[in-house]
Amino acid sequence: MTHKLAVLPGDGIGPDIVREACKVLEVLRADFGLDVAWEEAPVGGTAYDQTGHPLPDTTLELAKSADAVLLGAVGGPQWDNLDYTLRPERVALLGLRKELDLFANLRPAKVFPELVDASALRPEVAEGIDIMVVRELTSGIYFGEPRGVEELPDGRRKGLNSLVYTSDEIERIARVAFEIARKRSGRVCSVDKANVLEVSQLWRDVVSHVGQREFPDVELSHMYVDNAAMQLVRDPKQFDVMVTTNMFGDILSDEASMLTGSIGLLPSASLSAEGAGMYEPIHGSAPDIAGIGKANPLATILSTAMMLRYSLDEIELADRIERAVGQVLADGLRTPDIAGEGERAIGTAEMGDAVVAAL
Ligand code: ATP
Ligand code: MG
C-alpha cells in the first residue's frame, strides 16, 4: 500500500531543508522501491500570510489523513507581534500535536564520530553518546487544571499550574520507551521527582509495573531529575533510553541535544497511538539564514529516516539514510554550522545532493 505523506515546509529555512529531504524520498522511491506519495501544504507564518491562519483547515485535514507528517520549521520575527491566538509556533505546532494526538516525543541525541569535536564535552566523554529521550507530550504541568493567575483579597496575586498524570497516560508513554529500548541496548532510565512529588511516585510505580509485567527483558532504572541533569553532563554514555514527563523532558531533551554541539543535525519524532507521527528537526526556522543556502538539511533528512522507522515500518531504508549521512560526514562534507575553522563549507543543496549520491 502506498505510504501517504503530508509535507509541511513552513517558514524560514523550512522550505530550504524540506526540499533536500524530498530529494532523498524521491531517490528511495525511484531506486529502492519505496511506495510513497506526498502532498505539500502551507503551515505557520507562511500559511497565516496566505490564508489568515497558521494552521488552515485544508492543511490540518491533509495531516490527519496522512500516514506521517514531515514538518520543516515555523515562526519568525515578522510574526512575533501577532496576537497570542495567531502565533505560528503556538497555533500550528500545538494544534498539530493536539489534533493528531501526538503523545510521545522522541529526541535522539547522538554524537557522530566525525563530529566529536563539535561537542562542548571532553572528547572521551562525548565520543559514542547515543541517547533517546522519550518525552510525554500531551499531559503534565503544561496542560493540568486548575491553572491561572488570580487576585487574592489582600492584593497579592497567586499563580498556579497543576502537575497531573493519570495511570493510563503513564502506561502508554512507558510502553513507547520500553519498545524502543528493545530495539537498542535494552535499557530504560525513568526520570522523576518521586522524593518530593506524589504524582512522581505514581509515575515511578506505573513505569515499574509496566516494565515488570510486559518488558521483563528490558533493564529499568529510576533517577531523580536533578541527578539526571547532572549525570547527563558528567557521564552521558550511561544512558540509553530516558523516559520522562512533559516538562522534565522539555528541559532534559534540550540539555541532551546540546551535548552533541550540532543543532543542525538532530531530528525528532512525535508519535500518536495509531502509529501516525510528525517528524521535524529540533532546530527552529533560523530566519537569519533563510533562503541563502546555508542551512544544514541533515536534521530534516534524519527526521525522514525516523519517519521511515517509526511510522512507515521501512527499517532498512531508515538505516540506509542514516548510513548515507554518516558517509557524507566521514567524507568531510560540512555545511557552515558544522565546519571547523578554516574548513571549506558547502551549501544546503550540495549537502542534500551528497546524501543522495551516498545513497
Ligand atoms: P525557535 O524558537 O523556533 O527554536 P530559535 O531562534 O530559538 O528558534 P533556531 O531557529 O533553531 O532557534 O536558530 C538558532 C541558531 O541556530 C540560529 O543562529 C540559526 O541560524 C542556527 N541554526 C538552526 N538551525 C540550523 C540549521 N539547520 N543549519 C544551520 N544553522 C542552524
Ligand atoms: Mg528556540
Image (tube, helix red, strand yellow):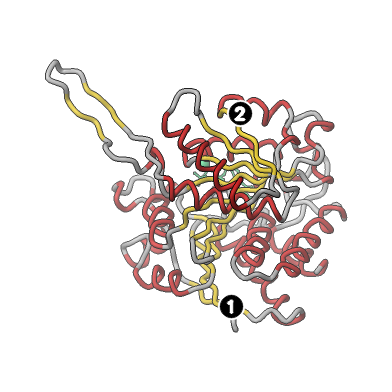
- Judged left or right of residue 123, residue 248 is left
| Kind of residue indicated by mark 1 | His
Percent of width and height locating residue 133: 61, 44
Element under label 1? strand
Q: Quadrant of the N terminus?
A: bottom right
Give how far apart the Cα atoms at labels 2 and 1 are: 39 Å
Instruction: Kindly indicate the quadrant of the structure image that contains residue 343.
Output: top right
Percent of width and height locating residue 41: 46, 71
- Judged left or right of residue 148, residue 115 is right
Element under label 2? helix
On residue 3, the disc is: 1
Viewer can see residue 20: no
Within 10 Å of disc 2 (Cα), the crowding (few <14, some 14-19, many 20+) is some
Residue furthest to the top in view is 154
For marks 2 and 1, the one nearer the N-term is 1
Q: Check the image and report above or below for 81 versus 300.
A: above
Q: Check the image and report above or below for 113 versus 297.
A: above
Task: List the residue tagged with mark 2.
Answer: 229
Report the residue at 43% width, 59% height from top.
Answer: 101
Percent of width and height locating residue 240: 70, 43
- Label 2–label 1 contact, CB within 8 A: no
| Kind of residue indicated by mark 2 | Ala
- Rendering quadrant holding ligand 1: top right
Q: Quadrant of the C terminus?
A: bottom right
Report the residue at 35% width, 67% height from top.
Answer: 56
